[in-house]
Image: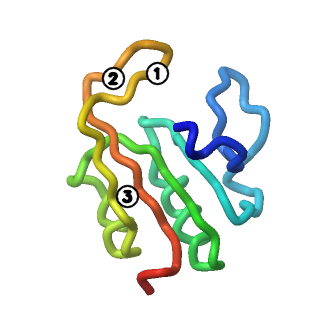
Amino acid sequence: MDLFKGWFDPCPFNPEPILDGLSLAWPNKTYVNPPYSNPLPWVEKAIEESKKGKQIALLLKLDCSTKWYKLLHEANAHLLLFNERVKFNGKAPPFPNALFILNNDRV
């Protein structure tokens, strides 16, 4: 994840919301790790921002049965898979993650 150092994070992990990342305009390089419980609004916002020529990376639970996965597929997102579970504070979630990259190079 060091690759995304310096990228804007509209959804930083924090028990108290410090900003409303869904209502802000995102800069050119944005990295999003949305809540697993409701990624859909973040995916919709990411697609909207990518249509403006911005590079957006989303770290999401890998679940191809969801509406948000279908939206990313239709938006021609690049899908990058990990060969092991991504760990947060030394712990891995009980599901795989994937990195979705949105940019306009495939439009």
Between residues 11 and 99, which one lies in front from this camera angle?
99
Return the disc, 1 or 2, that comes first in the chain's sequence.
1
Instruction: For marks 1 and 3, give the one nearer the viewer.
Output: 1
Q: Secondary structure at mark 1?
A: loop
Res 79 quadrant in image = bottom left
Mark 2 Cα-neighbour bin, 10 Å: few <14, some 14–19, many ≥20: few
| Circle 2: residue type | Pro
Note whether 34 is above or below 56 in the view shown: above
Give residue 93's mark. Answer: 2
Residue at (34% x, 46% y) in the render: 98
Farthest residue toward the front?
3
Residue at the disc numbered 3 = 68
Q: Disc 1 vs disc 2: Cβ atoms closer than 8 Å?
A: yes
Q: How far apart, in angstroms, are the residues tagged by discs 1 and 3?
A: 23 Å
* Residue 77: percent from left, percent from top: 39, 67
Q: Residues within 10 Å of mark 1 (few under 14, many from 20)?
A: few
Would you name the residue on which mark 1 appears?
Answer: 88
> Which amino acid lies under the numbered mark 1 shown in the image of this protein?
Phe
